[in-house]
Image (spheres, rainbow, N blue to C red):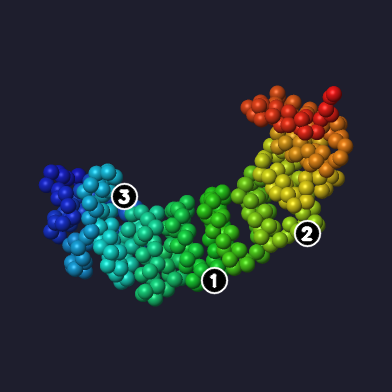
Amino acid sequence: MESSDNSNKPDSPHNDLSSEKSDSTESNSDDNVGADGSNSSSPSEYEEEGFFVQNYTINPEWKDISPVIPDPYEAKVLGIPYTIKFREAHEYFRAIFKKNELSERALKLTEDCISWNPANSTVWVFRRKCLLALGKNLVEELNYLNDIIVDHSKNYQVWQHRRWIIELLADPQTEKDFTDRLFKQDGKNYHAWQYRQWVISHFQWWDGELEYTEELIKEDLRNNSAWNHRYFVLKRTKQLQNNEIIENEVAFAIENILKVPENESPWNYLRGVLAGVGLNKFPEKTKVFENVTSVHCFSFRIDAMEELLRDQDMKDQMVVQKILELVEKLSTEMDVIRSQYWLFIGRTISEKYGTKKD
């Protein structure tokens, strides 16, 4: 693009059409930055990309609207260098919002504002009001939202909007595939996982979820999100009230622990599935940990042995001694950075369960 002399460039969107056209084709300034962050050559390009970016002040459709401009004092306090097009769109949005105009042009205006800032919750709420008032097809709205979420997948507002649509449609059939698509980009996307958990719990769509987490864990043993989701499914479906299922899950966790003993995720999962029955419920399975050396393993064994001590009238001093040996190794060799914590654990065990001397 050919550069131009910006000395005569208008510093406001309130100029005649010919001046604006000239600037839109020749200027390289920030005022000409498009909704996608690139330099634009004409407003029509944005419409082709799905954006409704235009100069509202020179559009006859908007001549009846007086833009609401923030108080200058507010601008001084914030001091954010918004582009002219950004400011213009939001000044007109404030005016539409103030008069609560739920129209086609208002809906298009929200699309413009969202293209600039998809985290603006006020714009999304107003867009929802427009969609309902105009009786719009929500499947089309879902399609519009797909690309936005892919580009802004860690944005709370876009996920809330999607939830609102699916709740009204009462049809979640596309949503597992959609979240799976995002997990292929980032398997630990908190927002996508939270949304998937809402979908399966709201619609009671639990089928296949355990198998799904198993596949993800096979791909990445350290995917804590997949481990968390597996626990979420079992807990919400009350399967952890069944000892046979608990035993199977203990075996599943141990199988993956032995592959990478320093991986904290399956250790946390194991503690979770045993929370209701105790760490010593399946001693024939957890006995294998006596041959495992890792910080997480020693920590688990200490807690399991303390559980045994709590249930004993006469405290087994061999168990106390074994705990203190593990604490010593942790504090001096394996987890020195937390040595003071482990020394505190050792003192506490000695005081609570050790033999008191006269």
Which residue is denoted by mark 1 in the rendering? 171
Q: Residue at 72%, 36% (x, y): give it.
A: 299
Q: Amino acid at mark 2?
A: Asn
Q: Which mark is residue 242?
A: 2
Give the quarter of the image for residue 109.
bottom left
Q: Earlier in the sequence, mark 1 or mark 3?
A: 3
Which residue is denoted by mark 3 in the rendering? 38
Label 2 secondary element:
loop
Q: CA distance from mark 2 to mark 1?
A: 31 Å
Closer to the eye: label 2 or 1: 2
Q: Residue at 75%, 58% (x, y): give it.
A: 241
Say if 116 sits above or below 309 in the image.
below
Say if 333 sits above or below 146 in the image.
above
Badge 1 crowding class, 10 Å Cα cut-off, few under 14, some 14 to 19, many 20 or more, is few
Q: Is residue 203 visible?
A: yes
Quadrant of the rendering where the C terminus is positioned: top right
